[in-house]
Image: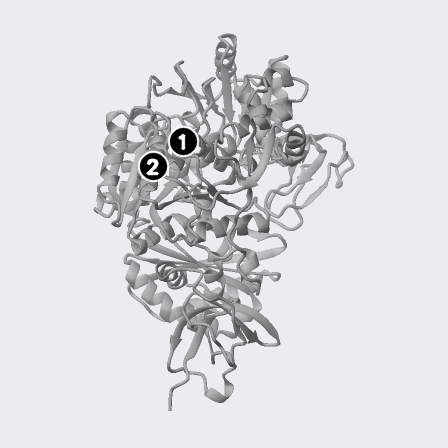
Amino acid sequence: MSVLPILRIAVPSPLRRCFDYFPPLHNERALFPGVRVRVPFGTRTIVGVLVEVVEESSVAHPRMRRALEVLDDTPLVSSALLRVLNWAVAYYQHAPGEVLPSAFPTSLRRAHPPTARVRDARFHVTAAGMSVELKNLVRAPRQAALLERLRRYPLGAAAVDLDAGIKVWRPTLAVLIERGWVEAAAAAATMSATTFKTDAEPTLNSAQAEAVTQVLTVLGQFQTFLLDGVTGSGKTEVYLQLTQRVLVRRQQTLVLVPEIGLTPQLVERFRQRFNLPIALLHSGLTDRERAQAWRQAQQGEALIVVGTRSAVFTPLPKLGLILVDEEHDLSFKQQDGFRYSARDVAVIRAREERVPIVLGSATPSLECLYNVQQGRYRHLSLPARAGEATSPALRVIDVRRQPMRGPISRAMLDAMTHHLSAGHQVLLFLNRRGFAPTLLCHACGWIARCTRCDSHLTLHQNSRQLRCHHCGAERPLVETCPDCASTELRAVGAGTERVEEILAELFPGVGIARVDRDSTRRVGALETLFDGIHALRYRILIGTQMLAKGHHFPGVTLVGVLNTDQGLVSADFRAGERMAQLIVQVAGRAGRGERAGEVLIQTHFPGHPLLRVLLESGYAAFAQAALLERQEARLPPYSYLALMRAEAPQSEAPLRFLNAAKEAAGITRSVQLLGPVPAPMEKRAGRYRAQLLVQCNNRTTLHRFLDEWLPRVEALKVSRQVRWSLDVDPQELY
């Protein structure tokens, strides 16, 4: 009598376990791990992922239900990617039914069949379109811009090619087709060898050439490289040269970037070099666009895949190389739900796929530098800027007892005047949007506070609103104090809106571009601002982190950092590292052209030891000093952390649960449980929060403890009174 196989399925639920089912009746499809299975779950019918086929189950046979349908003929993910997903389930202690669907677009998480092979039309410029003089289209700038872009693609441009550079192009395309300048044709079913041949490549300097050579020697093997290159050193050119070698082998390259805002410019560099389909994967796409890009990648049609965090789980049958740009960036860490680090998952994926991975940064994370010291990563250094560009000079402005115009010192204004008079551009960095972080009554001391969070409401003068930047609450700006009816309401502190207003008064007639989340909300707004910056219509640039990372502004010769003090006095042990990274990153926007750059940093703490090391000896020396501090304090990367968070509408419930969880751990010598304590911002979005920190000097010991502890926590009755989660390797202790 044959034994009926049992399907172990990851079912979408918050439970940290898989569920066992009998196979469907009359099933004719193979039962391979990685296929989707439709199953009954409670009173619903949902789609799960087959993890493995086993012979025995702990569930009694009379209680076990039968799966309804196997949805796929072949697995949608490879065995290597399935191992990565299972690793993530175990390492991050998360529900498999929420982890495994990360590899699929939204449509495939339902019972929809995989879409047919993607053969979108490609749009070609006709002979008539090639003969058009663009300068004659001065009254039709959109037609000129689209025609110019289409001419860059001799084999035709797909919709995704146009999306990367022009937000609204379909109506204009219809006009070009009607005029006979453009025609649509089906995409070629095969890709010829000439498709990925490039024009003349830029000459690499010795450091770039050495980096490329080191990686090429291990193609087809697993090795992690840290590409440590100063801003402007040509890391992207190294990425391009490596990608070309991988394309010659007919393999795929996965490129991860931390934010959507950095995707278009990097994709454009790849498109200029390679006339190939490039799959884009990020949260700004529609479900249909994401599904099409996913299918191109999964079928091996897209040989270059560029995406943000979640793209690390994309199925890639021909994977040959993984590139992670700005590896230090906090955006690679998912901060809610399935809390994973895309950078760390990418390293595990490279190991399972047996391919090299390059982690690039001008300011490498201390964890990566520690792994270099331990011999786990190989270090590739690009110590100088590419071409004729030189590194900018950094100087501190001590603002103590100095006259200020808002957050801007007189010395900063004088430097701005000098650079603007020379015809250059100036960039001011302030990581605080809005007009002012606090609205205060001068008569009685009332402060506009968020009723749902332990925070002040930020004044947004342009929209006449008070907004909470933590929960998103908004309300109209009040004209009188609600406590004493005084009209003496004053804005305290300064954000990017206020800086823009001050500079408009001081530099009349000078174009000012403010780049933050508020000014770029509209579709296409960011691209419009960047076009104006490159065309020198804007001479003064003001922005938050959106402006600090990865952008190339050759006209900028002065960068001013208006406030570094928060990173110097924060209770977060990572604040100093992030402050240094931000200073170096924003400083890298200066002097990227032929003209020398200057960076001025305002602070009330000019003698701070880490700041002095950074400015006098550079980021490498700063990182070594910071690593020594971490080692003495036994903080990561010299120890390992997990943070248990709890929240509830009642203030007592989170601490009550966490105290019970701590008691459930029992007495352990190898693991420390610190707390519980209220979160630094205890009330957020109407819920009270607390946290319990778990610290251990050995990673394996920590995970062994978590494996034993969490089932006890889940069994606690008080666990039903709170919403709780575990964050392994937390990046923010809030």
Residue 275 position by quadrant:
top left
Q: How crowded is mark 1: few (under 14 residues within 10 Å), some or many (20 or more)?
A: some
Is 84 displayed left or right of 27 in the figure? Answer: left
Query: Mark 1 is on which residue type?
Result: Arg
Residue 195 at x, y percent in the picture: 40, 36
Q: Can residue 318 be seen in this view?
A: yes
In-front residue for pair 280/418: 280
Q: Is residue 203 above or below residue 329?
A: above
Task: Please name the residue that numbered disc 2 is placed on.
Answer: 244
Q: What residue type is labelled 2?
A: Gln
- Left or right relative to 438: residue 29: left
Position of residue 437 measured from the top left corner of the image (x, y, whole percent): 60, 35
Left or right relative to 507: residue 442: right
Which is more N-terminal, label 2 or label 1?
Answer: 2
Up-down relation of residue 80 to residue 33 (above or below)? above
Label at residue 273? 1
